[in-house]
Image (tube, helix red, strand yellow):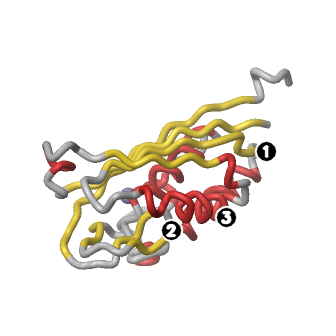
Amino acid sequence: MNAIQGLRVGLGMDSHRIASGGPLILGGIKLDADMHLVGHSDADVLLHAITDAVLSAAGLPDIGQIFPNTSDENKGRDSGEMLAQAMDLVRENGWSILNLDCVVQMERPKLSPYKGLLKQRIAELLRIDISQVSVKGKTGEGVGEIGRSELAAATCVVLLYK
Ligand SMILES: [Zn+2]
């Protein structure tokens, strides 16, 4: 297999509704904020986007197929555990991560103070080096569902190699 055939890109996107009252679980860590994300699992929008990106790049079924939100087993589930399990599947299929790049869209809190922690936790869950992980935060400029803090969204692009 040549170098080009041994590379796969994957894209993952997710969004969750925001409700009042903390803590905010994002990227596998607890952020100091008086809001939380609403979902069947722990609603970790960033880890869900990453999970879908790695699964998709490896040509595997998506997060909803592997961890259905109709299953009681996945209710309130730790998304870090789902991501680690998805990454095991990706590895079993012979793929490794070259790098991943993520964008979180939330009006608040500011993500800059948490960037190091977020990258570290994601790297741990994926068993890669922190230098392979990038996380950026973007606000909604006060406009739309994101700007009104009604919604949080995340996008992740990942590059795998064999
Ligand atoms: Zn989600």
Q: How many marks?
A: 3
Disc 2 to disc 1, C-alpha distance: 25 Å
Between residue 114 and residue 97, name the one nearer to us: 114
Q: Is residue 150 left or right of residue 112?
A: left
Quadrant housing residue 45: bottom left
Mark 3 or mark 1: whose residue is earlier in sequence: 1
Label 2, secondary structure: give it. Answer: loop
| Residue underneath mark 2 | 28
Label 1, secondary structure: give it. Answer: loop
Disc 3 to disc 1, C-alpha distance: 19 Å
Q: Are marks 3 and 1 in contact (CB under 8 Å)?
A: no
Q: Position of residue 71 (x, y in %)?
A: 41, 71
Quadrant housing residue 96: top right
Q: Is residue 95 left or right of residue 144?
A: right
Q: Amino acid at mark 3?
A: Glu
Q: Are marks 3 and 2 in contact (CB under 8 Å)?
A: yes
At a point 21% along the width and 49% down the height, the residue shown is 146
Mark 2 or mark 1: whose residue is earlier in sequence: 2
Quadrant for ligand 1 reads: bottom left
Q: Amino acid at mark 2?
A: Gly
| Residue underneath mark 1 | 94
| Residue underneath mark 3 | 124
